Amino acid sequence: MHALDILGDPVRRRILELLAEGERSAGEIGEDVQREFGISQPAVSQHLRVLRESGFATVRPEGVRRLYAIAPDPLENAAAWFDPFRRFWQPHLDALGTELARGRRARRLAAEQADAETRTPDSDTEESDTTDPQEE
């Protein structure tokens, strides 16, 4: 089965998202997925089995619990599959990054200018009318 066939299922993608946060027990995964997708525990177990058998997830027993973790190699292989297509969106992402940087720079310069204007004393009130008590 191709990696994208595995990742094409929204339940399996969600399980991988949960595992990306760290190792989880089958029960924890089942609770979240059952609540979000309204599927049975056996259905969740089937998705976990597909992820395990395809190499996307690893499992280790800990007492009576089975702890699942993400396996990075198949995800790297799936990401590599997209390499020939990156040229279609990468320039747009680069342009977006440039525009975001310009916006941050413009906001920073405007804030610095506003700060400088509040620190500059008025030319009419350069000297204070109060006298120092020690001078008297």
Image (cartoon, rainbow, N blue to C red):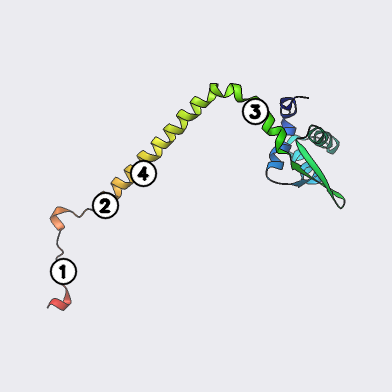
Q: CA distance from mark 2 to mark 3?
A: 53 Å
Q: Earlier in the sequence, mark 4 or mark 3?
A: 3
Q: Give the label, 4 or 2, closer to the camera.
A: 4
Q: Which residue is mark 4?
A: 108
Q: Residues within 10 Å of mark 3 (few under 14, many from 20)?
A: few
Quadrant, the C terminus: bottom left
Instruction: Please state which amino acid type lies under the numbered disc 3.
Output: Ala
Q: Earlier in the sequence, mark 4 or mark 1?
A: 4
Q: Which residue is mark 1?
A: 130
Mark identifier at residue 58: none
* Residue at the image point whose x is 14% and y is 62% from the top: 127
The percent position of residue 46, horizontal first and vertical second, equals 84, 34
Q: Earlier in the sequence, mark 1 or mark 2?
A: 2
* Residue at the image point whose x is 74% and y is 33% from the top: 11
User: Is there CB contact under 8 Å for labels 4 and 1?
Assistant: no
Q: Which residue is mark 3?
A: 80
Q: Give the label, 4 or 1, closer to the camera.
A: 4
The percent position of residue 63, horizontal first and vertical second, equals 86, 53
**Against 23, is 39 above or below?**
above
The percent position of residue 78, horizontal first and vertical second, equals 68, 29
User: Is there CB contact under 8 Å for labels 2 and 3?
Assistant: no
- Picture quadrant of residue 55: top right
